[in-house]
Every structure is written in structure tokens, then in C-alpha cells.
């Protein structure tokens, strides 16, 4: 008997040890994915950051650990924000707030508000974004641990940048100084990149104030700091020097530094979202120098780079949106399964209830049998209704898919009947757009329809036998008429206009 008990105790210990080891391995894997996501984010590889964050989130949900889940939602929201999916980012920020652990996680609360601020400002809600930054600062400002100090410094920098872009340079300097004060509390080797970034923005601010000497001084400080710690990524400093010499009308010198910035990015495989703009600046320098051949050459490169960047961004956006839509479908499926479980529990409870009722009230057997029969019949009716609804849903989905395929086929073949058929499939489309501006021409409505269907500029140009530049210019005119922000995707905006709750 004692031997049997010992064996059971030993088996229990082994099982518990195995479970602890498995959980530890999961936490370790999540931590590695977090680090990989952060590394990709620093290298501006937005889609890669999203993939790592998504994997970490899936594992975190399996652990059931509220703190890890909340952190994974933050990482996912951050990656979606980088992909310019602000609305989706805000959804995951809200999910992070639903976790119980968030109440005691002051650092994460502040980080979520900082991220929410960026999303709000990107969506044009500037005052709301600034308010979130002030609240993020208030949460964290009394803490003295290194992570909180770094975060507070970053928040001060974000507020400073907000005022910089609003051309309130004096206020920007106030917050840049506050950021500098915080960074002094951390060993320089741990925050030299943050410091160099700050110096660059101070230099930009001085350049806006036409204080060229101070601007050059802070650019040099940024250079010296990076060289001190052997950081090879100097493209930001080269761009700042290019801007400085451009302001001084030394176009040859400005050109040299802009070209150096591109070379530096190529050497270190850094994909900057604003890299097409550098080619634009180079073309402008050639234009100012009277070198029209090089000017036109770099104007063409700029156009190609911008088009490529937009195509890549659209692919990344589409990939991320597909993953999110799949998640929503899975959530819906789980909810349905949960409903079936509830129904089963109710039915089982009823059966148990009737069974004991039959035992207790043997005299009323016929009545109990009638009730059971009625309950069973009700169940069958519900199953039939569910089956019928599922069948109707599938039929409706097939019709929608067929209509979409037909409209897409007509669009690709530039068929004259395309827009008439499109209006039949999407009857609210023209009405909604004309509510915004009743003076839209038919050609503009057709271009909106192509964009609504998800075609990019190159595809539309190919299908309608127009040049890429013509289509791009017309889309730009439409964006102005719709009063769209630069960061807003016109296709998604149009789909949301027709169906705010897709």
C-alpha cells in the first residue's frame, strides 16, 4: 500500500514538473518572438514585425496568462499601426485594456496611451492624440525605473514633435529639453540612439527658425554620438545635412549628402518609408542647379519608388487585414460553438429534470412523456432552423461571390457595361458618393469603382489603357475632393463608406 502511494506521488511530481517545463518553454518562445518583433520594428520591416507579433499573440492566448496576453495585444497593435492600419490597431489596444492585469501594469498603460495617441493623430484627431500623450505622461512621470524613464523621455519627444509639426517651435523646444533631462538619467550607451534622434529633431527645429548655426551644431552632435558608439546608420544625419545645405542654397553640397543617405540605407538594408522623398529632394537639387537631364531622371526614379512603395504597402495591408478577418471569422465560429454548447447544456438539463420528475411523480408518466416529446420536437425544429439558416447563408455568399467575380471580370476587360453592372451589385455606391459631392463626373465614379474593388494604380492604368501618371493624378484629385488624409487608404475608405460595419 505504501509503495503504491509513493508511486502515485512520484508520478504526480513528474506530471507537474513536465507541465511547468512546457509552460516555461512557451513563455521563453513568446519572449523570443517579442524580441524578434522589436528588432524588425527597429529595422522598419513592418510586415515581418506583424508576423512575429501575431505568432506571439497566438501563443500568449494559449497560456491564459493575462499579463502576457495584454503585452502581446500591445505588440500586435504597434505592428498594425506601423502598417498604417490605425483603426485595427485601436481595436487591439482596446483588447489589451480588457485584461485584468492591465490595472496593475502602469508601464503598459502608459505605452498603450502613447500608441493610441499616434493612431489618433494619424487619423486626423490631433487634439485627442495630444490629450492621450499628456495622460500617458501623467501615469508614468513619478516612476524612477529605467524603462519608465525611457518611456517618459519618448513621450516628451512625441509631444515636442507634435508642436514641431504644428509650427509651434518654442513649445517643441520646451519638451525636447524635458526629454533631454530624462535621458541624462540613463547611461549614455543604452540610449545613444534616442539621444541622436533628439539632436536631429532639435536641428530641424532650429532650421525652421532660420538659425542655421545651431542647426549644424546639433547635427554634428548627432554624428559624434553615433560615431562614438560605432553606429553605422547615419542616413538620418546625412538627410539633415542635406536639408541644412539646401536651406543655405548650397545645392551641390546638399545633393552630396542626400546621395550619401541613400548609399547608407542601401549598405545596411534599411527600408525607410520616406526614402522616395529623398529621390524627390535629389531631383529638386538637380533642378536648382540647372541639370535638367538628372532632374528628370530622379523625378522618374521618385515616381517609380513611390509607386513600388504604395504597391508593397497595399500588399502588406492586405495580408494583415486577411489575418484579422480570419481571426474575426474564428471568433464568430467559436461563439457559434459556444451557443451550441449552451443549447446542449439546456437540453441535457431538461432531460435530467424530466427524468427525475418521472421518478418522483410516477403517476404522471404520460404527462412527462408528452413534455419530453415536446422538448425533443422543439430541439429538432431548432436544428432544422439552424440548418436552413446555414444553407441560406451559403447560397447568399455564393451569389455575392459570383457578382463580385462578374464585376471584376468586366472591369479587367474595360467592358462598357462594367459600371452599369457595378451599380446593380452595389446600389448604394453612387448615392453615397454623390451625397459628398453631387458634381462628380461619370469617369470619376468609374475610377472610384475600380479603387473600391481593390485594384491598384498600375492595374487600373492597364485595364483602362491610360498611363500610370494619369491614373495617379486623377486619384490624387479624388482624394482632395474626399478630403482624405495622406495616410488613409482610399479603397478601404470607400468600402467603409458603403458599409461602415463590414
Image (tube, rainbow, N blue to C red):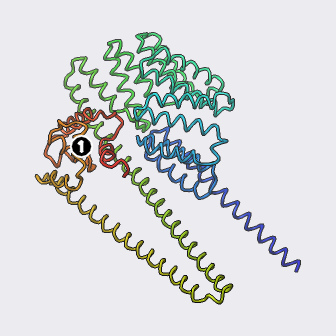
Residue at 34% of width from left, 46% of height from top? 496
Residue 45: x and y, percent?
Answer: 44, 42
As drawn, 388 above or below 186:
below
Number of marks? 1
User: Is 378 on the left or on the right of 310, as rendered?
Assistant: right
Q: Residue furthest right?
A: 2
Left/right placement of residue 86 relative to residue 406 reads right
Quadrant of the image occupied by residue 269: top left
Q: Residue furthest left?
A: 416
Image coords of residue 498 (percent x, y) = 30, 47
Q: Nearer the viewer, residue 342 or 106?
A: 342
Q: Secondary structure at mark 1?
A: helix
Q: Quadrant of residue 20?
A: bottom right
Residue placed under numbered mark 1 in the picture: 457
Where 83 sits versus 137, above or below?
below
**Could you say where residue 97 lies in the image, as x and y percent from the top left?**
57, 44
- Could you tell me which residue is drawn at 15 percent across and 42 percent down? 443
Report x, y in % for residue 152: 60, 29
Front one among 392 and 324: 392
Residue positioned 24% across, 34% down in the render: 476
Which of these two is toward me, 247 or 76? 76
Q: Residues within 10 Å of mark 1 (few under 14, many from 20)?
A: many
Q: Is residue 302 left or right of residue 446?
A: right
Q: Quadrant of the N terminus?
A: bottom right
Asked if residue 53 is positioned above or below residue 231 in the image, the reply reads below
- The residue lying toward the viewer, choosing from 123 and 24, is 123
Q: At 25% across and 58% down in the image, what residue appears? A: 404
Whether residue 147 is situated above or below residue 348 in the rendered picture: above
Amino acid at each position: 500500500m505504501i509503495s503504491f502511494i509513493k508511486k502515485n506521488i512520484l508520478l504526480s511530481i513528474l506530471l507537474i514538473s513536465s507541465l511547468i517545463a512546457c509552460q516555461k518553454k512557451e513563455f521563453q518562445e513568446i519572449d523570443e518572438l517579442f524580441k524578434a518583433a522589436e528588432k524588425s520594428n527597429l529595422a522598419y520591416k513592418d510586415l515581418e514585425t506583424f508576423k512575429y507579433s501575431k505568432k506571439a499573440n497566438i501563443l500568449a492566448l494559449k497560456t491564459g496568462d493575462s499579463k502576457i496576453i495584454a503585452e502581446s495585444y500591445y505588440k500586435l497593435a504597434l505592428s498594425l499601426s506601423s502598417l498604417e492600419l490605425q483603426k485595427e490597431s485601436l481595436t487591439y489596444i482596446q483588447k489589451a485594456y480588457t485584461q485584468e492585469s492591465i490595472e496593475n501594469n502602469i508601464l503598459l498603460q502608459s505605452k498603450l496611451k502613447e500608441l493610441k495617441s499616434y493612431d489618433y493623430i494619424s487619423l486626423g484627431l490631433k487634439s485627442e492624440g495630444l490629450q492621450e500623450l499628456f495622460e500617458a505622461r501623467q501615469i508614468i512621470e513619478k516612476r524612477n525605473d529605467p524603462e519608465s524613464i525611457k518611456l517618459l523621455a519618448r513621450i516628451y519627444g512625441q509631444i515636442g514633435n507634435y508642436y514641431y509639426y504644428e509650427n509651434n517651435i518654442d513649445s517643441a523646444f520646451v519638451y525636447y529639453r524635458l526629454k533631454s533631462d530624462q535621458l541624462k538619467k540613463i547611461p549614455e550607451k543604452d540610449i545613444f540612439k534616442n539621444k541622436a534622434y533628439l539632436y536631429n529633431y532639435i536641428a530641424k527645429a532650429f532650421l525652421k527658425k532660420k538659425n542655421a548655426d545651431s542647426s549644424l551644431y546639433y547635427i554634428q552632435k548627432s554624428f559624434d554620438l553615433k560615431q562614438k558608439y560605432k553606429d553605422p546608420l547615419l542616413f538620418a544625419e546625412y538627410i539633415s545635412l542635406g536639408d541644412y545645405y539646401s536651406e543655405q542654397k548650397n545645392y551641390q553640397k546638399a545633393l552630396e549628402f542626400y546621395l550619401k543617405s541613400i548609399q547608407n540605407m542601401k549598405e545596411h538594408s534599411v527600408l525607410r518609408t520616406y526614402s522616395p522623398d529623398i529621390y524627390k529632394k535629389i531631383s529638386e537639387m538637380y533642378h536648382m542647379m540647372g541639370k535638367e537631364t538628372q532632374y528628370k531622371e530622379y523625378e522618374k526614379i521618385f515616381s517609380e519608388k513611390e509607386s513600388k512603395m504604395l504597391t508593397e504597402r497595399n500588399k502588406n495591408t492586405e495580408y494583415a487585414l486577411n489575418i484579422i478577418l480570419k481571426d474575426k471569422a474564428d471568433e464568430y465560429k467559436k461563439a457559434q460553438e459556444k451557443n451550441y454548447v449552451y443549447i446542449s447544456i439546456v437540453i441535457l438539463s431538461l432531460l435530467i429534470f424530466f427524468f427525475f420528475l418521472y421518478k418522483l411523480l410516477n403517476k404522471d408518466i404520460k404527462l412527462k412523456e408528452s413534455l419530453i416529446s415536446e422538448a425533443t420536437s422543439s430541439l429538432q425544429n431548432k436544428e432544422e432552423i439552424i440548418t436552413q439558416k446555414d444553407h441560406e447563408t451559403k447560397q447568399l455568399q455564393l451569389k455575392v461571390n459570383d457578382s463580385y467575380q462578374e464585376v471584376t471580370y468586366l472591369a479587367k476587360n474595360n467592358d462598357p457595361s462594367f459600371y452599369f453592372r457595378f451599380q446593380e451589385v452595389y446600389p448604394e455606391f453612387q448615392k453615397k458618393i454623390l451625397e459628398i459631392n453631387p458634381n462628380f463626373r461619370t469617369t470619376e465614379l468609374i475610377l472610384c469603382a475600380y479603387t473600391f474593388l481593390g485594384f491598384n494604380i498600375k492595374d487600373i492604368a492597364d485595364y483602362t489603357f491610360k498611363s500610370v501618371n494619369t491614373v495617379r493624378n486623377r486619384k490624387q484629385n479624388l482624394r482632395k475632393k474626399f478630403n482624405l488624409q495622406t495616410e488613409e487608404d482610399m479603397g478601404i475608405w470607400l468600402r467603409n463608406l458603403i458599409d461602415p460595419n463590414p
